[in-house]
Amino acid sequence: DKKTVIITGASSGLGLAAAKELAATGDWYVIMACRDFQKAEKAAKEAGMFEDSYEVLHCDLASNRSVRHFVDAFHALGRPLDALVCNAAVYFPNAHKPGIFLPGLFAGEGPRYSADGHELSFAANYLGHFLLCKLLLEDLKRSTVKPARCIILGTVTATVNGAELGGMIPPIAHVGNFEGLEKGMKAPVSMLDAHEFNGAKAYKDSKVCDVMLMKELHRRYHNETGIVFTSLYPGCIAETGLFREHYPLFQHLFPAFHKSVTKAYVSQEEAGKRLAACVSDERYATSGSYYSWGGEAGTGGSGGKDAVENKDKELDWFMNYGSFRTLSIDEIGGEAADDARCRKLWDLSERLVQAA
Ligand code: NDP
């Protein structure tokens, strides 16, 4: 029998590439948890996925009710759950506080909110996944595949280590002491630190929360359940839908910049292989780890091909960007290093999903 993996946001980009990769092995049945059913079906067909290798189930992570419906629909299939991939995300790089308007540069658009009234990047990228993980934990626990896995996507621009260049590109992630979350993350509050709205920062903050979630899941449940909780940065997949709201000039130059300057560029196909490896390869099964890739092999970095651990923190970031390395749970830096804040995030999130 095939093993079952749920991948959120599998209708495009990295999620689709990993779904394709896992389905093609013949070992995995992929549940594509997507907000746009038609788009996901079409994407799976165009990717050449065989009909008996996947199923699309509706799931809008920006609605707690939809996440609960998705879990009910999944349970109705009567399948076991062997791996869960929290991949879906939105990014609003042009959204600043309302009122700023420089023609062609800033849309001046304010924050958007989820069905439950929470700021949308926080809701879709993090809170929906928090609820999903909680609701599916028992299923992962019952898996006969050892270890069952839960993988949550991170990003180099926020979480890996506050001291590295990726984390120092403004706007810098800052969840503070979750002052905004304490106030409920509903309008007029839009940022976790309760400061002024900034769409690019909201994305990075949500990704810090994703890594904190992985750490907290590991701390609470790994020993008791054996489930492996990990996070990863797959390299810079510069052509995905994530950048759909960026300026056209940026969309045009971004891939070339990362191919030639930072060497961090990775194709969707290669990134999909990296995520698929986190799901099924025994080399990526140490709970609490953060796996960080750089560019593709042959572009200046070692890529994922020779997954060699490189823990030499003294290397210049640019030189190091192309290489692969594993951060153990204690090496995860920046705000995500703070265990007290990880706990606080968990407690406040529980309150939000219970109230919604
Ligand atoms: P894409 O925009 O291509 O994919 C994002 C997916 O998330 C889409 O399938 C989208 O659905 C889905 N999604 C968005 N909102 C919701 C929602 N409310 N409910 C359900 N699904 C939703 O981006 P990527 O493939 O690049 O991103 C995938 C992951 O990789 C993200 O977590 C991102 O943070 C991470 N990542 C990406 C990097 C990159 O360079 N691209 C670098 C580092 C990390 P739809 O198709 O309907 O829009």
Image (cartoon, rainbow, N blue to C red):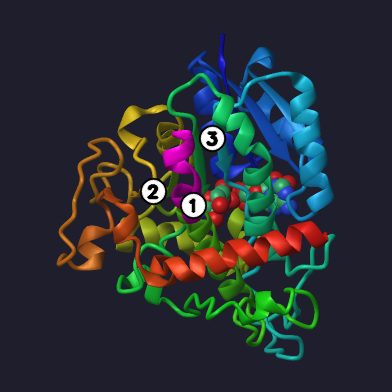
The secondary element bearing badge 1 is classed as: helix
* Residue 81 in the image, given as x and y percentages of width and height: 60, 26
- Residue 36: quadrant of the picture: top right
Q: Which residue is mark 1?
A: 214
Q: Residues within 10 Å of mark 3 (few under 14, many from 20)?
A: many
For label 3, being within 8 Å of ligand 1 is answered: yes
For the residues bearing labels 3 and 2, Cβ distance under 8 angstroms: no
Q: Amino acid at mark 3?
A: Ala
Q: Which residue is mark 3?
A: 17
In the rendered image, which quarter contains the C terminus? bottom right
In the rendered view of the protein, which quadrant contains the N terminus?
top right
Quadrant housing residue 226: top left
Label 3 to label 2: alpha-carbon separation: 24 Å
Where residue 75 sits in the image (x, y, percent)?
Answer: 75, 27
Does 222 appear in magenta?
yes
Vertical relation: 283 (above or below) 256:
above
Residue at 35% from the left image edge and 61% from the top image edge: 332
Which mark's residue is nearer the viewer, 1 or 3? 1
Q: Which mark is residue 288?
A: 2
Residue closer to the observer: 319 or 355: 355
Start-end of magenta stretch: 216-226
Does residue 273 appear left or right of residue 99 in this picture?
A: left
Is residue 214 positioned above or below 91 on the image? above
